[in-house]
Structure formats: C-alpha cells, structure tokens
Image (cartoon, rainbow, N blue to C red):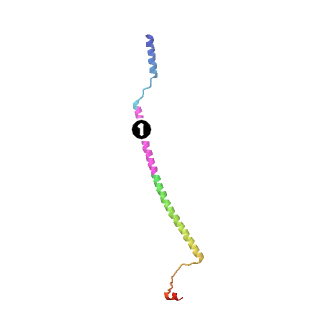
Amino acid sequence: MTTVSLSYHLIQRKIKSISLPSINWKSVYIIGISACLLLLVFYVFYVNQLTQGTYLIKNYNKKISVLSRENKSIETEFSEAMFLGQIDGKVNALGFEKTKEVKYLEILDAELAKK
C-alpha cells in the first residue's frame, strides 16, 4: 500500500501545480461595468454626431434648393435683358424713334364709300 499512497501523493502534487490561479471576481465585475459605461458614453456621443451631421445635410439641401431657385430667376432675368438689349439695338439700327404724340385721322363712312 505504500506504493499506492506514494503514487496518490505524487498525483496530488501534480494536480496542485496544474491548478488554475484564483480569479479576483470583484475586479472582473468592476472592469466589466466600467467597460459597459464607457461603451454607453461612446454610443451617446456618436449618436449625437450622427444627428448633428443629418441636421447639417438637411440645412445644406435647403440652401441648395433656394440657390437653385434664385439661379433660375436670375437666368430668366438675364435672358430677358439680353433680348430687350437686342431689340433696342435693332430699333436704333433701323432708325426708329419713340413716339411723343399720337394723332388720329377721322374718316367718315360716307367718304369711304365714294372712293
């Protein structure tokens, strides 16, 4: 039996030398809770950044639409001005003048029938 008890003691020593180190669960819980809180803070920060970016994009789209409308109206005014400028140039080239006074001719019905 000495051999059995001796081998039993050797096995016990090997098991003790192989055993896992003890874990301090209190520090594991504190680290886990701290990590969760840190992730929550980052989540709130990034959601805020996303909301701010969306707001800026919406405002820029509004400005783009307003500027597009203004651009169309300016283009229309420019084309009208160019058209009127061309008309003034042609009128001056043909020698037309602005009317200052209008005189009407009176034609009687009887005289028109005689001719």
- Magenta stretch: includes residue 19: no
Residue 83 x %, y %: 55, 69
The image position of residue 74, as x and y in percent, is: 51, 64
- Predominant SS along the magenta part: helix
- Give the side of residue 115 with respect to residue 47, left or right: right
Q: Does the magenta stretch include residue 49?
A: yes
Q: Residue at x 40, y 33 (%)?
A: 29
Badge 1 element: helix
**Residue assigned mark 1:** 36
Query: At x 44% / y 49%, what residue is drawn?
Result: 51
Q: In this view, does 73 lie above or below 99?
A: above
Considering every residue shown, the one lying at the far front of the view is 113
Query: Residue 47, position in %: x, y?
Result: 43, 46
- Name which residue lies at 47% across and 52% down: 57
93 left or right of 48 in image: right
13 relative to 104, above or below: above
In the image, the segment drawn in magenta is 27-54
Q: Is residue 15 visible?
A: yes
In the rendered view, tell whether residue 94 sits above or below residue 19. below
Place residue 33 in its image quadrant.
top left
- The residue sitting at the right extreme is 93
Q: In which quarter of the image is residue 36?
A: top left
Number of labelled discs? 1
Question: Going 45% across and 52% down the picture, which residue do you hit?
Answer: 55
Please identify the quadrant where the C terminus is shown. bottom right
Local crowd size for mark 1, using a 10 Å CA cut-off: few (<14), some (14–19), many (≥20): few
Specify whether residue 108 is in view. no
Q: Nearer the viewer, residue 59 or 69?
A: 69
The amino acid beneath tag 1 is Cys
| Position above or below: 35 against 62 | above
